[in-house]
Image: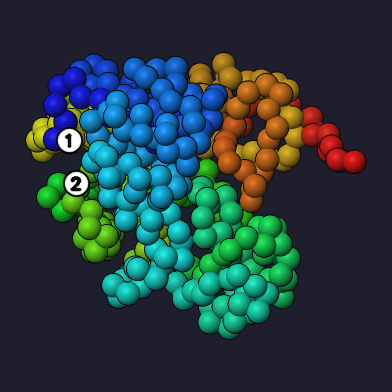
């Protein structure tokens, strides 16, 4: 339990770390960010920052000595780093959980051993294994890098008549997992654990079909078009996986596909939804008061031992669009932001890509052009608002110049 004046150490300096720090300050908590990237956006808003590599034990030791508890903003922090720090300060979630959830093959083996429904799968470290894996999964199938994949990054679909080796080559022949493609609609659960019990804070619908060849997540909408019984099955599936992982307290984010009555677990992570997407969620006393707080503040209150039972998600529907990158090149200009913000129900438009930034579409992409947020009485109204706002935007992207080393 965090005490007033405590310092939270955060591994990673991206948007989630920044938003945690901004939510922590009014609660009397300090944040110290550790990131190897000197331009990490969280450095601008924290009490203290350390810019050093994740294997720099001297810097890690000083960082541990300056904080009271340590967490991480995403699951791609090296597990060895978390284990090193755990010998000096409490690290939450447990580094063993981090090690499981940051490797798709390890995670899939873990979930499968629990008899939780998953797609058929196999490891891919060679062309021979790729062929053997497809014999197991059948076609269509999905290739996913074992590590460093998120939001569609590091994924490629293999179809009947397609070239599996070419699909693997598009992922730079990285160690992968191949999974059978699961038909159905995809959903994401945002939750919080108390005493090992999962409370669903929101279930997001992903209305754009995620059918490949790459799997770019563009829109999240809540509430989803599901009945209460279907929602309960999703929560129960996440609960089973969380219990097995040993998750007892804090945030949980899970992805699944619903095919008829079957809920197929795709991924689970001991963290909240990433980046600016969390701004789509706000919480109020009994869901109606004017005293609204962010997801990050809710989680920090939870870490202080506060009872969250009086806090509920706002009752209006909400949507966020993660603006996709259409092609590779240099971003030169963005037009139409004022018109996009004027669309009914749109709350904000945030362009996060910088001028002259090199843009990479999937499967290389590691970011988005920006985000569009909307809130409306009905889910379909919020969804249409972000789509209409997106149509107002025009991005000038010049071809990137290829540089050849000689």
Neighbourhood count class around disc 2 (C-alpha, 10 Å): few under 14, some 14–19, many 20 upward: some
Determine the CA span between mark 1 and mark 2.
9 Å
Residue wearing tag 1 = 302
Residue wearing tag 2 = 249
Of residues 190 and 288, which is closer to you in this image?
A: 190
Q: Secondary structure at mark 2?
A: loop
| Sequence-wise first label, 1 or 2 | 2
Cβ–Cβ under 8 Å for marks 1 and 2: yes
Of residues 114 and 157, which is closer to you in this image?
A: 114
The number of discs equals 2
| Quarter in which the C terminus is drawn | top right
Picture residue at 47% right of the left edge, 37% below the top: 56
**Residue 346 can be seen, yes or no:** no
**Residue 65 can be seen, yes or no:** yes
Q: Is residue 7 left or right of residue 325?
A: left
Of residues 219 and 128, which is closer to you in this image?
A: 128
With respect to residue 230, does 119 lie above or below? below
* Residue 354 quadrant: top right
Of residues 108 and 186, which is closer to you in this image?
A: 108
- The extreme right residue here reads 406
Q: Which mark is residue 331?
A: none
Picture residue at 35% right of the left edge, 45% below the top: 84
* Residue 264 quadrant: bottom left
Picture residue at 51% right of the left edge, 20% below the top: 341
With respect to residue 314, does 156 lie above or below? below
| Quarter in which the N terminus is drawn | top left
């Amino acid at each position: 339990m965090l005490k007033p004046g405590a310092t939270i150490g955060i591994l990673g300096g991206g948007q989630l770390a920044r938003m945690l720090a901004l939510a922590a300050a009014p609660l009397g908590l300090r944040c110290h960010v550790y990131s190897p990237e000197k331009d990490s956006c969280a450095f601008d808003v924290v009490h203290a920052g350390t810019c050093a590599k994740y294997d720099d034990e001297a810097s890690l030791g000083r960082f541990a000595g300056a904080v009271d508890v340590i967490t991480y903003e995403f699951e791609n922090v090296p597990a060895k780093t978390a284990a090193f720090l755990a010998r000096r300060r409490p690290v939450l979630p447990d580094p063993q959980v981090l090690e499981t959830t940051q490797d798709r093959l390890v995670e899939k083996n873990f979930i499968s051993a629990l008899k939780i429904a998953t797609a058929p799968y196999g490891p891919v470290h060679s062309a021979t294994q790729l062929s053997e894996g497809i014999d197991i999964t059948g076609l269509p199938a999905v290739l996913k890098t074992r590590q460093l994949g998120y939001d569609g990054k590091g994924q490629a679909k293999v179809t009947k008549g397609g070239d599996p080796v070419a699909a693997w080559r598009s992922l730079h022949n990285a160690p992968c997992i191949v999974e059978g493609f699961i038909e159905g609609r995809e959903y994401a659960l945002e939750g919080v654990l108390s005493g090992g019990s999962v409370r669903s804070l929101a279930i997001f619908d992903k209305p754009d079909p995620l059918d490949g060849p790459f799997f770019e997540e563009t829109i999240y909408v809540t509430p989803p078009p599901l009945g209460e019984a279907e929602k309960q099955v999703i929560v129960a599936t996440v609960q089973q996986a969380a219990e097995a992982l040993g998750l007892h307290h804090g945030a949980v984010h899970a992805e699944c596909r619903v095919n008829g009555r079957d809920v197929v677990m795709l991924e689970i992570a001991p963290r909240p939804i990433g980046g600016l997407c969390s701004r789509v969620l706000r919480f109020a006393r009994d869901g109606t008061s004017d005293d609204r707080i962010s997801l990050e503040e809710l989680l920090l209150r939870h870490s202080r031992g506060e009872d969250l039972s009086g806090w509920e998600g706002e009752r209006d529907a909400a949507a966020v669009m993660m603006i996709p990158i259409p092609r590779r090149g240099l971003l030169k200009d963005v037009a139409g932001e004022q018109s996009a913000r004027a669309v009914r129900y749109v709350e904000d438009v945030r362009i996060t890509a910088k001028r002259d930034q090199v843009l990479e579409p999937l499967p290389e992409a590691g970011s988005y052009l920006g985000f569009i947020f909307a809130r409306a009485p009905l889910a379909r109204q919020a969804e249409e608002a972000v789509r209409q706002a997106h149509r107002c935007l025009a991005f000038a992207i010049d071809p990137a110049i290829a540089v050849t080393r000689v």
